[in-house]
Image (cartoon, grey):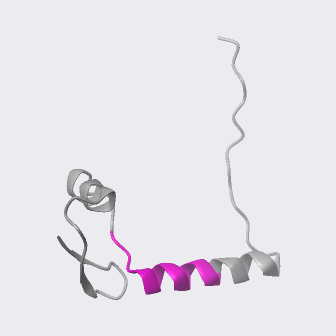
Amino acid sequence: MRVKCVLCEKIEKIESGSPLAKKLRNRPIHTYMCESCDERIGNRTKERKETGNFKLFHQDESTDEW
């Protein structure tokens, strides 16, 4: 299966039977990112977290008895 990276638009081939290929085929909302872009975004996110200005907003799940 041929896939295109969302950020750098590089075209790569992945195995058609792989879980990633099935996810991309069945759910069009999921997008593909190549390994280099994924690593670059991960490194920059870690750098921003270390500065202390990075906030993750999670909703607190309140336990409902009902």
Q: Residue at x 71, y 83 (%)?
A: 47
Identify which residue is drawn at 32% across, 61% down: 20
Is 62 placed left or right of 35 in the picture?
right
Q: Is residue 50 left or right of residue 30?
A: right
Count of numbered tags: 0
Q: Classify 45 as above or below 36.
A: above
- As for residue 2 lying within the magenta part, the answer is no
Q: Position of residue 38 (x, y in %)?
A: 48, 78
Residue 16, by quadrant, is: bottom left
Q: Along the horizontal axis of the image, is 65 left or right of 10? A: right
Which quadrant: the N terminus? bottom left
Residue 53, given in percent of the width and then of the height, sits at 78, 75
Tell me the chief SS of the magenta region.
helix
Rendered position, 2 above or below 26:
below
Q: Nearer the viewer, residue 35 or 4?
A: 35
Locate residue 35: give its quadrant.
bottom left
**Residue farthest to the right?**
52
Residue that extends furthest to the top in the rendered view of this protein: 66
- Which residue is depicted at the point 28% across and 60% down? 18
The image quadrant that residue 40 belongs to is: bottom right
Q: Position of residue 11 (x, y in %)?
A: 23, 85
Residue nearest the viewer, comparing 4 with 22? 22
- Quadrant assignment for the C terminus: top right
Q: Which residues are magenta?
A: 32-44
Q: Where residue 59 sits: x, y (%)?
A: 67, 44
- Which residue is depicted at the point 69% across and 61% down? 56
